[in-house]
Image (cartoon, rainbow, N blue to C red):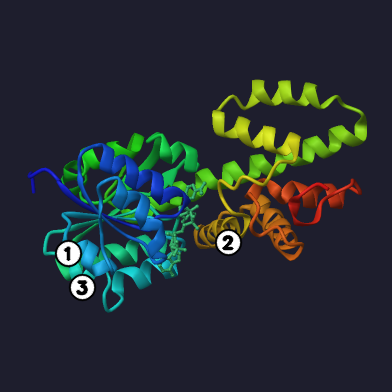
Amino acid sequence: MSEAVQNVAFIGLGRMGTGMARNILKAGFRLTVYNRTATKMQPLIDAGAAGASSPGEAAAAADVVVTSLMDDRSVLDVVTGEQGVLAGLKLGGIHIGTTTVSPGHAARMADLHAAHGTHYVAGPVVGRPDVAEAGQLRTFVAGDPAVIARCDGLLHAYCQMVVNVGEKHQVANSLKLAVNYMGVSLIELMGQVYAFGEKSGIDPQHLKLLMATMFPQPQLQEYAERIRARDFDEVGFALAAGLKDVELMLQASLDARVAFPYASVIRDKFLSAIAHGMGDRDWSAIYEITRMNAGLEWARGGRPS
Ligand SMILES: NC(=O)c1ccc[n+]([C@@H]2O[C@H](COP(=O)([O-])OP(=O)(O)OC[C@H]3O[C@@H](n4cnc5c(N)ncnc54)[C@H](OP(=O)(O)O)[C@@H]3O)[C@@H](O)[C@H]2O)c1
């Protein structure tokens, strides 16, 4: 169990996955990539990665497979499909799951791998695509400590901070949902305050200053600025995908019997925003629904005219 990881497969080259894969390559690992839409593999192939024609082919070339997919369903399909990860990964191989999935899914993945003689590490990530591109993500990892230790160099290739939360895989994903609940609640709160400010005659520059003082963390600053400027065109996290995260939060709160009341309010805003054509905007575009509810001028599709 002590040999160093050299061969890595990366599956899912979306907004997050592309930057993560690029940093793994830069760190000197031998990388094989697979993406459902094959054209997205080309920039990484040009940079020195090998391309695979199925998840199984990518996994067969690797000691460790990293997945960055959309949700529980897409991960399950990619892992258990006829030409899926389990069909290719050799005995003792490792799968690191970075997708934001339900805690129950993480436990199920661990069982599937254990039955197959392979290992699962739950490793959801925190940070937006620009942070992924910079190799500065944070991750919560859970699983067998010896397996995680083998992956240390790999995890640090795409993360600035690796927090080991123990052996129960689902805990890493519960923690990720807790972080996202706080994040999206703050986005909602900032929107409410900007709408209140506009109707009450508060200078938006004063709100900007206040938020810079209260929320100095760079990602929260970026959200505050997007909301102030109503700039949702450059998508870090798509609103339609964000609804998936809010539903995961609500299910997790139900399972734990701990109410997440803001998640219910926010879910309804996501539904309205999607109904008004904002599904492909950044998820902070829910501010437009806050504006509509407040009787302020608002923009269908999240694009002020
Ligand atoms: N964006 C963020 O700020 C952020 C931050 C932290 C965590 N996350 C989480 O990271 C994950 C990826 O997010 P993202 O923003 O990178 O999403 P994205 O840009 O939409 O990328 C999704 C990736 O999953 C693939 N995929 C989706 N459904 C699939 C299926 N059924 N079979 C095979 N491949 C499939 C897509 O392939 P195609 O290219 O073929 O569509 C693409 O490679 C999500 O779970 C998200 O919640 C996102």
Which of label 3 and label 2 is nearer to you? 3
Residue 99: image tag = none
Q: Is mark 3 within 8 Å of ligand 1?
A: no
In this rendering, the label closer to the viewer, 1 or 3: 1
The image shows residue 77 at horizontal and vertical percentages of 37, 73
Which numbered circle lies on residue 247? 2
**Horizontal placement of 148 versus 162: left or right?**
left
In this view, 165 is above or below 114: above
| Residue found 80% across the figure and 48% down from its top | 290
Locate residue 151, reporting x and y percent: 21, 44
SS assignment at label 2: helix
Q: Amino acid at mark 3?
A: Ala
Counting from the top left corner in percent of width and height, residue 167 is at 26, 50
Label 3 to label 2: alpha-carbon separation: 31 Å
- Please give the name of the residue rendered at 61% of the width and 52% of the height, measured from the top-left corner: 260
Q: Earlier in the sequence, mark 1 or mark 3?
A: 1
For the residues labelled 1 and 3, the Cα–Cα distance comes to 8 Å
The residue closer to the viewer here, 52 or 190, is 52
Residue at label 1? Answer: 60
